[in-house]
Image: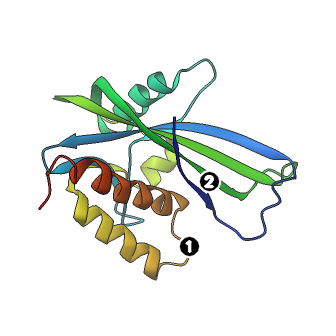
Amino acid sequence: MIVLQEIFHSNDINLSGKIIYREAARGIIIDKHKLLMVYSPKNGDYKFPGGGVEDGETYEGTLCREVEEECGYKVERIEQDFGCLIEYSQALEKDYDVFKMTSFYYVCKVGSDFSRQNLDRYEKELDFKPVWVDIDDAIKNNKSIIDSVSDQAQWTIRDTFILEQVKRQIFAINSWKP
């Protein structure tokens, strides 16, 4: 999968130090002019549904599980790979220097049936809500948070970059937006 971007969340990351890795799968779900995103009223941001790959799981399996848990919709099909984004930040674990997160993004379709979310504790605390949002509204909202909030969630930066790529690579090509 093509690497779309590398993001360094700090200037003093020691890439030659001990690195802890995490991989995630995330869904780009489009219906007409809107995207299915996860909205956090506490953070005020939009993020793509998805999360960490568990032992023995494929990226596709992770994607399907996470979309259903966070949004309550079942993935009907994965249409294409979109790309991946790599993030580097200071590790919180005391034996490590760097936390390296690679997020794999897939364009997919969900069914129309909605079921109950099955959120993790931190997702409940952030009051995650699945919403269909206009891409321009999501970009504008997240950019406003990036510009005005010093300690926003790192995913806000990551997913705002991906939103802009989706607008440029999918919406513009398909003439879904003026």
Between 41 and 174, the one lying in front of the other is 174
Q: Give the colour scheme shown.
A: rainbow
Vertical placement of residue 168 versus 103, above or below: below
Q: Which residue is mark 1?
A: 151
Q: Secondary structure at mark 2?
A: strand
The part of the image, by quadrant, that contains residue 10 is bottom right
Residue 87: x %, y % from top left:
62, 53
Q: Are discs 1 and 2 less than 8 Å apart at CB?
A: no
Q: Quadrant of residue 127?
A: bottom left
Looking at marks 1 and 2 on the same chain, the residue that comes earlier in the sequence is marked by 2
Marker disc for residue 87: 2
Q: Residue furthest top?
A: 56
Residue occupying image coordinates x 68% and y 55%: 88
Could you say which is closer to the camera, residue 63 or residue 169? 169
**Residue that extends furthest to the bottom in the rendered view of this protein:** 148
Task: Give percent across and percent down for residue 25.
Answer: 48, 35
Which numbered disc, 1 or 2, marks the residue closer to the eye? Answer: 2
Q: Tell me the amino acid under the disc marked 2.
A: Glu
Q: Residue at x 22, y 42 (%)?
A: 30
Please provide percent x and percent y for residue 81: 41, 33
Quadrant of the rendering where the C terminus is positioned: bottom left
Q: Amino acid at mark 1?
A: Asp
**Horizontal and vertical percent position of residue 69:** 38, 33
Q: Is residue 97 left or right of residue 83?
A: right
| Residue at the image point whose x is 35% and y is 56% from the top | 163
Q: Residues within 10 Å of mark 1 (few under 14, many from 20)?
A: few
Question: Going by the image, does 177 lie left or right of 47?
Answer: left
Label 1 to label 2: alpha-carbon separation: 16 Å
Judge whether residue 118 can be spotted in this image.
Answer: no
